[in-house]
Image: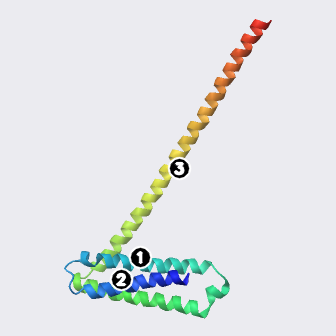
């Protein structure tokens, strides 16, 4: 788990370094967009690992001073660097650019979540419809068998008596 967290932190730091290195010469936000993607992905990985770790492992893993200190310091450093990047983006591309990026990203994440919820609802409806068709088919088949047996028994008794 620590290695996974370090990978997220490394990705985050690499993105920060990339943004700092290119923001001065970037003509538009698109030129640093790849670094911004990595920045948010690295932050996301760190948060996911931190959330996973809070519920997994022994008490020593969760509450050890080293782990707690590392998590708190990494979170504070990441927050500082995010604020620094936000200021740099706003200074380079105009006030409010960072807020617009964050807001648009949040909107797209929410839209993706809503689309996934809708997709799952549609799958559930299709599954329920499929089950209904199967049940109706079985009932129809049993009715046909019952009718066939009834006709066969009538023929049998009519010819045998």
Going 56% across and 77% down the picture, which residue do you hit?
52
Residues at circles 1 and 2 in contact by the CB criterion of under 8 Å: yes
Gap between marks 2 and 3 measured at Cα? 40 Å
Which residue lies under the disc numbered 2?
15
User: How many neighbours does mark 1 have within 10 angstroms: few (below 14), some (14-19), or many (20 or more)?
Assistant: some
Instruction: Give the mark toward the camera: 2 or 3.
Output: 2
Q: Earlier in the sequence, mark 3 or mark 1?
A: 1
Instruction: Give the mark toward the camera: 3 or 1.
Output: 1
Q: Quadrant of residue 130?
A: top right
Which residue lies under the disc numbered 3?
124
Q: On residue 16, which mark appears?
A: none
Residues at circles 3 and 1 in contact by the CB criterion of under 8 Å: no
Front in this rendered view, residue 97 or 116 = 116
Question: Seen in the image, is 98 located left or right of residue 75?
Answer: left
x and y, in percent, of residue 113 in the image = 44, 63
x and y, in percent, of residue 126 in the image = 51, 45
x and y, in percent, of residue 74 in the image = 47, 89
Q: Quadrant of residue 60?
A: bottom right
Q: Earlier in the sequence, mark 2 or mark 3?
A: 2
Going 58% across and 80% down the picture, which residue do you hit?
53
Gap between marks 3 and 1 measured at Cα? 31 Å
Going 54% across and 93% down the picture, which residue do you hit?
69
The local secondary structure at tag 1 comes to helix
- Looking at the rendering, in which quadrant would you find the N terminus? bottom right
Q: On residue 41, which mark appears?
A: 1
């Amino acid at each position: 788990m620590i290695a996974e967290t370090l990978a997220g932190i490394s990705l985050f730091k690499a993105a920060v370094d990339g943004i700092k290195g290119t923001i001065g010469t970037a003509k538009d936000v698109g030129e640093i967009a790849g670094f911004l993607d990595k920045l948010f992905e690295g932050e996301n990985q760190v948060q996911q690992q931190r959330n996973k770790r809070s519920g997994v492992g022994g008490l020593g893993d969760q509450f050890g001073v080293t782990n707690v200190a590392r998590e708190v310091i990494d979170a504070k450093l990441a927050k500082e660097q995010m604020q620094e990047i936000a200021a740099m983006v706003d200074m380079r591309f105009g006030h409010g650019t960072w807020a617009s990026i964050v807001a648009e990203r949040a909107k797209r994440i929410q839209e993706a979540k809503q689309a996934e919820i809708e997709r799952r609802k549609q799958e559930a409806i299709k599954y329920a419809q499929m089950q209904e068709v199967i049940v109706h088919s079985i009932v129809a088949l049993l009715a046909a068998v019952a009718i066939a047996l009834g006709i066969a028994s009538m023929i049998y008794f009519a010819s045998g008596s």
